[in-house]
Image (spheres, coloured by chain):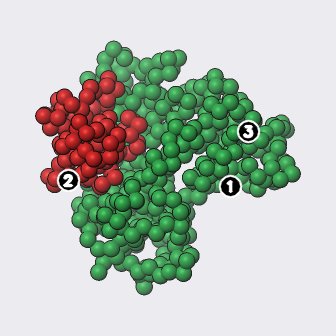
Amino acid sequence: MPGVVYFDPYGEEHRIDADEGQSVMETAVANGVPGIVGQCGGSLACASCHVYVHDEWLARTGEVSEMEDDMLDGAMAERRPQSRLSCQIRMSDDLDGLTVEVAPEQL
Amino acid sequence: MSAILVVGASHAGIHAAASLREGGYAGSITVVGAEDHLPYHRPPLSKDYLLGVTERDGFALRPEAFYASREIELRRGVRVEKVDATSGTATTDTGDTLAFDRLVLATGARVRRLDVPGGGLDDVVHMRDLDDADRLKALLPGVRRAVVVGGGFIGLESAAVLARNGVTVTVVEAGDRLLGRAVSPELSAWSADLHRHHGVEVRTGCAVSALEGETTVRQAVLTDGGRLDTDLVVVGIGVEPRLELADQLGLAVDGGIIVDAQARTSAAGIVAAGDATVQPHPLGDGTMVRLESVQNATDQAAAAAWSLLGKAPRTQPVVPWFWSDQYDAKLQMAGAPSSHDRAVLRGSPADGSFTHLLYRRGVLVGAESVNAPADFVAVRRALATGASPDPDRVSDTSVKLKTLL
């Protein structure tokens, strides 16, 4: 099972084993990581699962779609080059160890 | 040891329990829910679940292991029948007594029944819970014609799924337009066209006066004298908040449990969240509203948990919003749409992607979007931060909305 490391808005670290194919948002909600809400259930409708991907992982998390890109522009917390909506990142063994910081505010 | 009892195990109740742990509460948490199922996301019931796109295990609010890992005792298939704040005890329909020193009421709402002769016939489905969706799903293969009573979101989402399954559908709405409580007349008209385009007959200003059949419904009798042959009736005519426990507790109630912006009821140590509550509109002038949405349930639940723990309220503004999926259209509504005096169109209704930005006295108060989530997010952010893009410039789609904020 690929692992994800989350740093929540309080600075706490959460190391979690994800199921292959589960999104980074779903993994966070399933394990109660603070700060990731995922109100729309992952249907790319709400921008409440904003994370900053650590640089060394950024390339491996894949392309940002135009829709996600536009939605990140509207996210509540500052948009950075590392910004992603975590519902759009699917876990795989290739991402074992993925490290993300949860954005301090969610829309 | 401190004990918090959460009554209700849907979006609000479960998010309240999770938020209590997130807030550092270490005492006991018991969540009581009347349904047997692992608590689940409600929106897919009349959308992807009914359509067969999402499977049953695909939309649990949290996996079963979550509750144990957070030491949240989840009691499923149990109903709280009596509650007494003085003694701090609640009694369930299974005869158990639960002790608490603080209480979260997330009792939700029950579906409004179609109260006409024949309303109790077989194959009349009132849509609210997973069991209702399962009943409807099981009936679908044998259905050729259906009558949907109620042109609100539940009715229209159900109609869309039925139509996609090749069913001949008639939507009967008593009001003069679809979605009358929730969207602008322009979006009502667009929605009616959308459904007609998919072969659905839309009849507004008309209600069902009786249902007929021997054991199974066969005909719907309309108030305009018309009769519709049918194999199935789906009812989506709204919900009524569950207030029995609030009444027992002597809480202030007015069409819902009255709460403030921090989800506090009129009694100390008792908070309430979700469909059962009325609150001052988060963006309004103090007008009390009952909001039925996932967003409200979760935001209010988090506020409720924070109040019980004595934490300072979150400063982040709350913007009410909700969504609906019908065919390939994603409708999203935000803010206080009913209070607007001007709607500015951005995008193209003919192409199926547009937003109405809603203004009151020149200030942005809300929006409704169809297949325009990026614009919608920009508007939500504007509403949250108090920004108001110039209404005379927002219709130019060559300029990104965010640049006008």
Q: Is residue B122 above or below residue B324?
A: below
- The amino acid at mark 1 is Arg
Q: Which chain hosts label 3?
A: B
- Residue at image position (45%, 27%) is B371
Quarter where residue B104 is shown: bottom left
Badge 1 vs badge 2, beta-carbon distance below 8 Å: no
Q: Of the two numbered discs 1 and 3 on the same chain, state the one appearing first in sequence.
A: 1
Q: Which chain hosts label 1?
A: B
Quarter where residue B88 is shown: bottom left
- In this image, B403 relative to B283: left or right? left
Q: Is residue B175 visible?
A: no
Q: Is residue B397 above or below residue B134?
A: above
How much space separates mark 1 and mark 2, taking CA atoms? 46 Å
User: Chain A shown in which color?
Assistant: red
**Camera-nearest residue between B16 and B216:** B216
Instruction: Name the outermost residue toward the right.
Output: B214
Q: Secondary structure at mark 3?
A: loop
Q: Label 1: which residue?
A: B113
Question: Do circles 1 and 2 both sit on a common chain?
Answer: no
Image location of residue B243, percent across then percent down: 54, 66
Q: Label 3: which residue?
A: B143
Image location of residue B324, percent across then percent down: 50, 37
Q: Secondary structure at mark 1?
A: loop
Q: Label 2: which residue?
A: A14
Q: Is residue A45 above or below residue B38?
A: above
Q: Which chain hosts label 2?
A: A
- The amino acid at mark 3 is Val
Shown in green, the chain is: B
- In this image, B257 relative to A55: left or right? right
